[in-house]
Each structure stands twice: as structure tokens, then as C-alpha cells.
Image (spheres, rainbow, N blue to C red):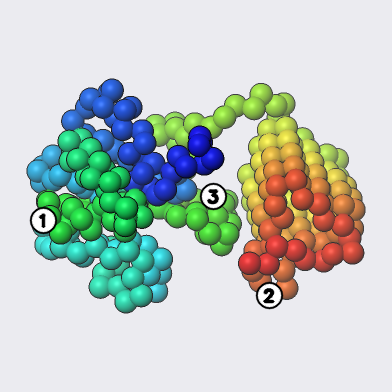
Amino acid sequence: QSDGGSNWYRGTADAIYQNLNFVEMVGDDYVLILSGDHIYSMDYDKMLNFHKKHHAKVTIGTIRVPWDEASRFGIMVADENMRITKFQEKPAKPESNLASMGIYIFNREVLEAYLKADAKDEKSEHDFGKNVIPTMLADKLPLYAYPFEGYWKDVGTIDSLWQANMDLIADEPPIDLRDSKWRIYSGNQSFPPHLIGPNGSAKSSLIAEGSEIFGTVSNSVIFYGVTIKEGAKVANSVIMPGSVIEENAVVDKAILGERCHIYAGAVLHNDDGSVAVLGRKEELKPEVTAKGEH
């Protein structure tokens, strides 16, 4: 940021445009661009081989989504060869259920040319889905949809973030965190192993290092450094690092941000069945029974 915030990224395309110097410095023929709020496991080599095979200028990773969810996504209409004929950004009436995964492979010179042109367009929102991709289609560039089959979750909403965590504790999770052939790397916090106290219990849950469980935990994801004190009950929830849940508190179907504090006897639960949310460093005292409706 500088000049009073004038250089904040104005959109997804502008974010890449402002960093084109890195792209040019590396100088490779192809550029892979990924979104940061998705959970999936993909071998990008297969997508790149698809891109080269079809002599594409741009290839977009796509996945079939339920028709009733299609309006949440950028939607591709493609022919029998998977060449994209139309792109609809979050359409009210989708013509396809082939959704963009926010994964792009561009020929570098094409990406640079279109981003530089888009940056000069004062009417543009500088967004790949709203501006750059439609312009490329209008110019009849060969854009292809790479069909991905597997687990993919857009975690841009509270519900989807909660569901993605619940997916990991299913009997047969869609992504195997312990697959030695396809390792998932995360930050090493160098905490001691988690502790389950003499009256504590945990079932069907993921519990990170450094956490101390003296109450009961079920069907939950517990991040590192969490403390759940005696008599507390945590179910169907996601508890982020450093949070403390005191004696006899109840947390059910909720997401707690980092370093939250649930006081003794407090209840965090939404009676309407929605996911309750407590933001980073927030507190909940016993006179409040639910917080964070969305």
C-alpha cells in the first residue's frame, strides 16, 4: 500500500498485473494462477499437458457442481472438445454446471498482453471472471476447460468452511491427510503432543499439537494450542489456534476464530441450525447463549 491506499489490488487480474515483474523475471512459457480459498488435491502437470495438447492460450480448471449451486460460480459452456464457447460469471440462469475452479494456465505472452490492456481500461473491474476472460473469448482466443474429477471445496462462505472441516473427520475423508505419496505440508508450530486429561475424551475429531482436552470433544477439528477445560463440551465445531473454552461451557456447530475465550457456563449454539461464529479474539460470557448468526 502507498499513496493513501491507491495501490491496493483492485481485482483478481490487477493483483497479477501488479506482480508481472515476477512473471517476467522467471520467464517461463506458461503461468499457473491459483485461488487461495479453495481446498482440493490436484496434479497440475496433467492440466498443463491438457493445455499443450489442445494448443490452448488459456486453460481453466473446471468441475461439475450441483445445478442449484451453479449461480455461485463462474460457469463455462464448452463444446465436445472442451473448448469454451461462453463464460457466465455467477449467472442467475446458468446454461451449464461446469464451474471454474479459479485455476488458470495462461501462455505467458497472452497473459501479459491482456493484463496490460485491462489495466488501462478505466471501466474495467480488473477481474479475471468479469473482464479478462470475457475479453479473451470475444477475441476468439482458444480457451479450454480442463475437467477435474475429485474433491474441491470453495471455502468462501461460513457454511462451506465449516463443511470442509467436517469432511475431514468423515469415516472416509475425501482428502487423506496421511497419504505419504501426496503429502500435505503445514506450519510446524513446535508444540508438544496434544493432551487428553483424565476426565477428558475425544472421538471422531482431529486434534492438533499443543492442545489440552479436559472436557469432551466430538466430531470437531481442534487447532493447535487450544484449551478445553473440565466439563466443557465441544461438538461439530472448528476451534482455531489458542482459543480457551472454560469449565462447563458448550460449543456446538460453531467456528471459533483464533484466541477466542468462552467463559465458564457459556453456550455457543444457534437454535436455527446455522453455524455460530465467534471472531478472532472475541469473548462469550454465560449470559449470551448464541452469537454469530449469519
Q: Which of marks 2 and 3 is in front?
A: 2
Which three-letter amino acid code belongs to the residue tagged 3? Leu
Q: Which of 116 and 112 is in front in this view?
A: 116
Q: Mark 1 points at which residue?
A: 140
The residue depicted at 47 percent of the width and 42 percent of the height is 6
Q: How crowded is mark 3: few (under 14 residues within 10 Å), some or many (20 or more)?
A: many
Q: Quadrant of residue 166?
A: bottom right
Q: Which of marks 2 and 3 is nearer the N terminus?
A: 3
Q: Which of 201 and 33 is in front in this view?
A: 33
Q: Which mark is residue 243?
A: none
Q: Earlier in the sequence, mark 1 or mark 3?
A: 1
Residue 151, image x, y percentages: 40, 52
Q: How crowded is mark 1: few (under 14 residues within 10 Å), some or many (20 or more)?
A: few
Using residue 74 as the reference point, say whether residue 198 is left or right of it.
right
The alpha-carbon separation of the residues under discs 2 and 3 comes to 24 Å
Q: Name the residue under label 3.
A: 168
For mark 2, give the secondary structure: loop
Q: Nearer the viewer, mark 1 or mark 2?
A: 1
Question: Is residue 201 in view?
Answer: no
The alpha-carbon separation of the residues under discs 1 and 3 comes to 42 Å
The alpha-carbon separation of the residues under discs 1 and 2 comes to 49 Å
Which three-letter amino acid code belongs to the residue tagged 2? Asp
Question: Is residue 153 in view?
Answer: yes
Residue 26, image x, y percentages: 27, 23
Q: Mark 2 points at which residue?
A: 272
